[in-house]
Amino acid sequence: MPRSPILDEFRASTKSKGRKWELRDITGYVVEFSGDQHGSRFIQTALTTATSEERQSVFDEIVPGNTLQLIQDVFGNYVIQKLFEHGTQAQKTLLANTMEGHIVYLSSNLYGCRVVQKAVESILPDQQAGLVRELEPHIMKCVKDSNGNHVIQKVIERVSPDRLGFVSNFMGHVFELASHPFGCRVLQRCLQHLPDVQTRPLLDELLLSYTVDLMQDQFGNYVIQFILEHGRRDDKASIVAQIRGRILFMARHKFASNVCEKALVFADSDARRLLIEEIMAPASKPDGTTPIVALMKDQYGNYVLQRALGVAEGEQKETLINTVRPQLINMRKFSTAYSKHLTSSMSLRAPSSMSFLTLYSRARA
């Protein structure tokens, strides 16, 4: 569709930095300007300092007839977001009214999902509740959608928990959500923002049945890490208990190794000590390889060993250092990028105050 002469004039004057434009200069052309890259940017900037009359003029040209079109437009959606940010509460209500019946579709749209999120932040609680009711029958579809999941996250963050009855629909699907690239994000927002009465059933389902599997999952490991960092003491203890007896395997797993690091940081001191004792256990394999050597040689395990060295305390720290030190001599036999990571990024305060890197250099000499 060809541009109007006024938009052509605006674009030309913008390049030449000539005429200073104001919102009243584009009366009758607001929709066209909103859908243009340069015109949209102009309106967005102008709305932040516009008078109430100027904002109303822009609003009247867009709402209701052109709202849905601009919400889904690559440039127009930003203008709608600005109206939600700077409009009056009455304007925000009317703007959101035009979206009724289209919330699910807009939430799955690349540009529409941004506007729906802005609407959730801007509208009153009763209208938020109406938006949630529209989403509820399609909640799992939205959670698993690359755009819709952001809307669900925003709803969980900003809407009163007593209006979020859809959370009960997640029960029986916790593993499915936690192991999904978008579902894992939504589940973490639930754990972060919702009260215990809503999250307890989800946590119980997860911790009682799926902890070990999710530690090793590409996306589920993030949920387990979140609980270790932000969860209740007994939930953290439940996860750490599942790592006990498995740390050598888990520490060398691409995804579970991240969980092991978190566990070493956020476990209570007694649990941390037991995990490190497991790392320092004597050789159990026929070839005489100790857990420490296995971790030092592994691309993931070496990071877990670094973390253990960083969080160990008191006598256990000295013992761990003294257990690692003799292995440095052998490291020249399998000098790899992984062992170099270990030697260069972790400073071991041995009794002689030598760093791990210094020890390694002497061993190689």
Image (cartoon, grey):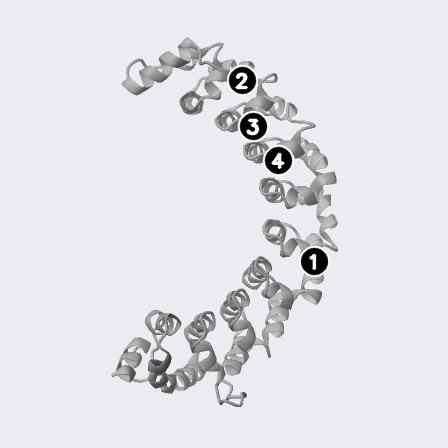
The disc at residue 341 is: none
Q: Residue furthest left?
A: 365
Q: Secondary structure at mark 1?
A: helix
Disc 4 target residue = 107
The part of the image, by quadrant, that contains residue 21 is top left
Q: Amino acid at mark 2?
A: Phe
- Ranked by sequence position, the earlier of labels 1 and 4 is 4
Amino acid type of the residue tagged 3 in the rendering? Gln
Which residue lies at the image location 58% right of the left edge and 18% below the top edge?
66
Rounded to the nearest angstrom, the CA distance separating label 1 from label 4 is 28 Å
| Relative depth, front residue between 236 and 51 | 236
Q: Which mark is residue 200?
A: 1
Secondary element type, mark 4: helix
- The amino acid marked with disc number 4 is Ser
Q: Secondary structure at mark 2?
A: helix
- Give the residue number, with chain letter if any, for mark 2: 59
Q: CA distance from mark 1 to mark 2?
A: 45 Å
CA separation, marks 1 and 3? 38 Å
